[in-house]
C-alpha cells in the first residue's frame, strides 16, 4: 500500500508539472500569478482530480463486482455498466436537455444502475465466465446501439461528432464544477462500498456463512449494484467510458491480498488511480502531434491482460 501511494504521488506530481507548457512555467518564475492560477486551477487540477477519482472508482467498483459475482472477469465495462451510463448521459444531455453537471451525472448514474440490474437478472447470482461475458456483451451491445440511435436522431446535427470524442474517454477541458458533480456522488458511493470489506470476504465463503456471521447477502447485492452504478455512471457522464481499468486493477490487487476479495477494494482503488493518471500522461505526451483518446490507451494495456486472464482460466480448467 505504501509503495502504491508513493507511486501515485509521484505520478500525480508529474501530471501537474510535466504537462505545464513553457509559458506558464515562465510565468511562475516571473510571478505572473494570474496566468499560473489559470493553468493550474482551471486546466491541470480538474484533470488530475478526475483521473484520480475516476481511476479509484473503476478499481474499487471492479473489485466489488468481482467479489459479488465471485468472478475475476466482472468489471464496470464488461458488465455493461459503462455502456449503460453512457446511454443515460447521452439521453439526458441530448434528449432531456439536462445541462447542469449534477443532473447529467444523475442521468449517467441511473443508466449504469439499470445496466447492472439487468446483468444480475440475466446472469444470476453466481454466473460462470461464459454466462457473465455473454450477458454483459448483450447489455453493452444493446446500450451501444441505443446510444448510437439517440445520437443519430439528436436535434443538433453536430451532436454525433461532439459525443464521439467524449465516448472515447477524455479528461481534457473539464471544469472544477464538472469534477465535483462526478466525484462527490461517486466518492459517497465508494465510501459506502468500502465499509463492506469484511462482508465481501465472508461472502466468498458462501451466502449461508455470510448470513450466519450477521450479513445480509441480498442487501449486499442490491447495495453493490446500485452504488457501483451510481459511482461509475456519475464519472462516465463527465469523462466518457474508459475500459479495462476496472478489470486490471482488481486482478492485480487480489494477487497482493492472497485472493481475499474484500481486502482488494482499497488497493484496487489506488491501482486504478495510478493506472488512469499514467494513461492520461501518455495521452498528452504521445509523440504523434495530437491528443490520443484516453480509452484507446487503457484498451492497449488492458486487452493483453484480459486475454491473459482468459488463457489462465482455460489452463486451470484443462489441468
Image (cartoon, helix red, strand yellow):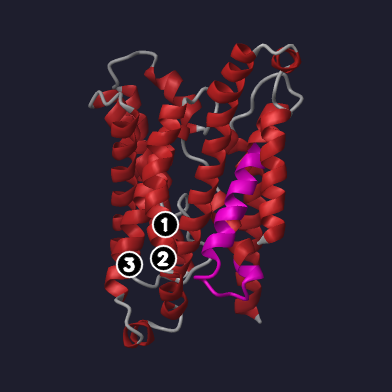
3D distance between C-alphas at marks 2 and 3: 14 Å
- Residue at which label 1 appears: 191
The residue sitting at the left extreme is 96
Callout 1: helix, strand or loop?
A: helix
Q: In this view, does 149 lie above or below 71?
A: above
Label 3 Cα neighbours within 10 Å, binned few <14 / some 14-19 / many ≥20: some
Callout 2: helix, strand or loop?
A: loop
- Residue at which label 2 appears: 195
Q: Is residue 189 above or below residue 128?
A: above
Question: Residue at horizontal 60%, vertical 68%?
Answer: 254
Residue 124 percent across, percent down from the top left: 33, 69
Q: Earlier in the sequence, mark 2 or mark 3?
A: 2
- Residue at which label 3 appears: 221
Tell me which segment is drawn in magenta.
254-279
Q: Is residue 145 left or right of residue 166?
A: left
Residue 119 percent across, percent down from the top left: 34, 58
Label 2 Cα neighbours within 10 Å, binned few <14 / some 14-19 / many ≥20: few
Give the main secondary structure of the magenta stretch. Answer: helix
Q: Is residue 148 above or below residue 309?
A: above
Amino acid at each position: 500500500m505504501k509503495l502504491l501511494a508513493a507511486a501515485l504521488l509521484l505520478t500525480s506530481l508529474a501530471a501537474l508539472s510535466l504537462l505545464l507548457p513553457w509559458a506558464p512555467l515562465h510565468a511562475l518564475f516571473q510571478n505572473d500569478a494570474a496566468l499560473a492560477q489559470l493553468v493550474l486551477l482551471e486546466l491541470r487540477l480538474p484533470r488530475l482530480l478526475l483521473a484520480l477519482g475516476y481511476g479509484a472508482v473503476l478499481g474499487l467498483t471492479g473489485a466489488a463486482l468481482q467479489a459479488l459475482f465471485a468472478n475475476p472477469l466482472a468489471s464496470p465495462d464488461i458488465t455493461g455498466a459503462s455502456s449503460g451510463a453512457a446511454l443515460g448521459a447521452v439521453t439526458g444531455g441530448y434528449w432531456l436537455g439536462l445541462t447542469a453537471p449534477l443532473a447529467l451525472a444523475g442521468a449517467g448514474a441511473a443508466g449504469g444502475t439499470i445496466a447492472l440490474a439487468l446483468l444480475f437478472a440475466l446472469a444470476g447470482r453466481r454466473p460462470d465466465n461464459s454466462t457473465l461475458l455473454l450477458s454483459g456483451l448483450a447489455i453493452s451491445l444493446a446500450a451501444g446501439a441505443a446510444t448510437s440511435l439517440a445520437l443519430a436522431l439528436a436535434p443538433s446535427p453536430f451532436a454525433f461528432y461532439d459525443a464521439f470524442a467524449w465516448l472515447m474517454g477524455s479528461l481534457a477541458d473539464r471544469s472544477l464544477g464538472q469534477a465535483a458533480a462526478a466525484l462527490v456522488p461517486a466518492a459517497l458511493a465508494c465510501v459506502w462500498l468500502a465499509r463492506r470489506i469484511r462482508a465481501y470476504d465472508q461472502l466468498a465463503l458462501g451466502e449461508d456463512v455470510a448470513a450466519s456471521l450477521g450479513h445480509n447477502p441480498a442487501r449486499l447485492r442490491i447495495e453493490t449494484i446500485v452504488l457501483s452504478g451510481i459511482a461509475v455512471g456519475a464519472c462516465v457522464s463527465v469523462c466518457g467510458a474508459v475500459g479495462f481499468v476496472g478489470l486490471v486493477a482488481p486482478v492485480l490487487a487480489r494477487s497482493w491480498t492472497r485472493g481475499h476479495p474484500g481486502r482488494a477494494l482499497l488497493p484496487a482503488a489506488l491501482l486504478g488511480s495510478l493506472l488512469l493518471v499514467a494513461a492520461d500522461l501518455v495521452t498528452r505526451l504521445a509523440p504523434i502531434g495530437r491528443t490520443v483518446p484516453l480509452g484507446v490507451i487503457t484498451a492497449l494495456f488492458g486487452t493483453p491482460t484480459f486475454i491473459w486472464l482468459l488463457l489462465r482460466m482455460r489452463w486451470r480448467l484443462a489441468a
